[in-house]
Structure formats: structure tokens, C-alpha cells
Image (cartoon, grey):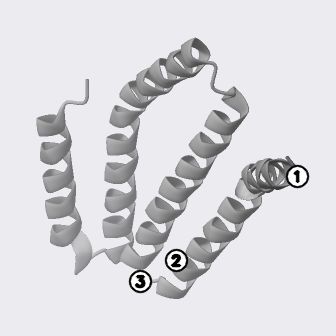
Amino acid sequence: MIDVVKIIIIGVVGAFLAITVKDTKPEFAIAIALVTGIIILMMCLEPIFGLITSLKNICERTGIDLTFFEIILKIIGVSYMTQLASAACEDSGQKSIGTKIDFAGKIAIIVLAVPILQQIIDLLLNLVNM
């Protein structure tokens, strides 16, 4: 289980440290913010993997095709990763790079979604032809 209190404490301490050194060593402030974010992300990985395992078990028991489940997980992963990277860029003063990361993430999501869209179109065509 995610220990939210620990995450909050780490986040607040990291933010305080980053703010404290920002005026004298801005490059350290960026590094502190990135390391704090990575630590928080690492604390969330184990529960995320447990959730994925549980959802895969549900798919297997209900007969849902795992291909679509995996595609949806990839789409969610791309969304979160691009959001985190974009926010890190914006925090370091590089908003234009963050915007381009957001754009690349959206393109990747569209590409990942194509097989699902193809299945939906095939299903609709089959229903119309019946």
C-alpha cells in the first residue's frame, strides 16, 4: 500500500529544500525537485504493479482480451510519463520543451490507440453487414 504520509513529507521537504537553494544555486533546486519526484515515483511502483496484476487476473477470469488491456495500460503509462516530464521541464523554466513533450505524448497515444480503433470499426462493419 502507498504510504501517503511519507510521500507528503518527502514532497514537502523536497519543495522546501528546492525553494531554499533556488536563489543561490538554481541548478541544485532543479536537481532536488527531480530527485524528489523520482523518489515519490519509486514509492508508487510496487502498488502499481500489484494493481496491474490484479487487473490482469480479472481480465483472464472474465475472458477479456489482454491485448486491449495492455494497450490501455501503455496509453495510461505514456500519459503519466509525459505529464511528469513536461512538469519537470516547466519547473526548470523550459516550458517550450515541456509543451513539445506533451505533444509527443499525445501523438504516441494516438498511435497506440489505432489497433483499438481498428477493432471498433471492424465490429461496427460486421454489425452493419449482418
Describe residue 128's horizontal placement relative to residue 87 as left or right: right
Describe residue 116's horizontal placement relative to residue 43 as left or right: right
- Whichever of callouts 3 and 2 sits on the residue coming sooner in the sequence is 3
Q: CA distance from mark 3 to mark 1?
A: 55 Å
Foreground tag (2 vs 1): 1
Q: Can you tell which mark lies on residue 98?
A: 2
Question: Of the residues shown, which amino acid type is indicated by label 2?
Answer: Gly
- The reply to whether the C-beta atoms of the residues labelled 3 and 1 are less than 8 Å apart is no
* Secondary element at tag 2: helix
Vertical relation: 6 (above or below) 18? above
Q: Which residue lies under the disc numbered 1?
A: 129
Question: Of the residues shown, which amino acid type is indicated by label 1?
Answer: Asn
Q: Which residue lies under the disc numbered 3?
A: 93
Question: Of the residues shown, which amino acid type is indicated by label 3?
Answer: Gly
* Secondary element at tag 1: helix
- Whichever of callouts 2 and 1 sits on the residue coming sooner in the sequence is 2
Q: Can you tell which mark lies on residue 84?
A: none
Label 1 crowd bin: few (<14), some (14–19), many (20+), radius 10 Å: few
Vertical relation: 84 (above or below) 27? above
Report the front residue among 64 and 114.
64
Question: Residue at 66% across / 60% down in the picture?
Answer: 109
Residue 82 location, x and y as percent?
A: 54, 62
Question: Residue at 57% across / 22% down in the picture?
Answer: 59
Vertical relation: 44 (above or below) 18? above
Residue 53 location, x and y as percent?
A: 50, 19
Q: CA distance from mark 2 to mark 1?
A: 46 Å
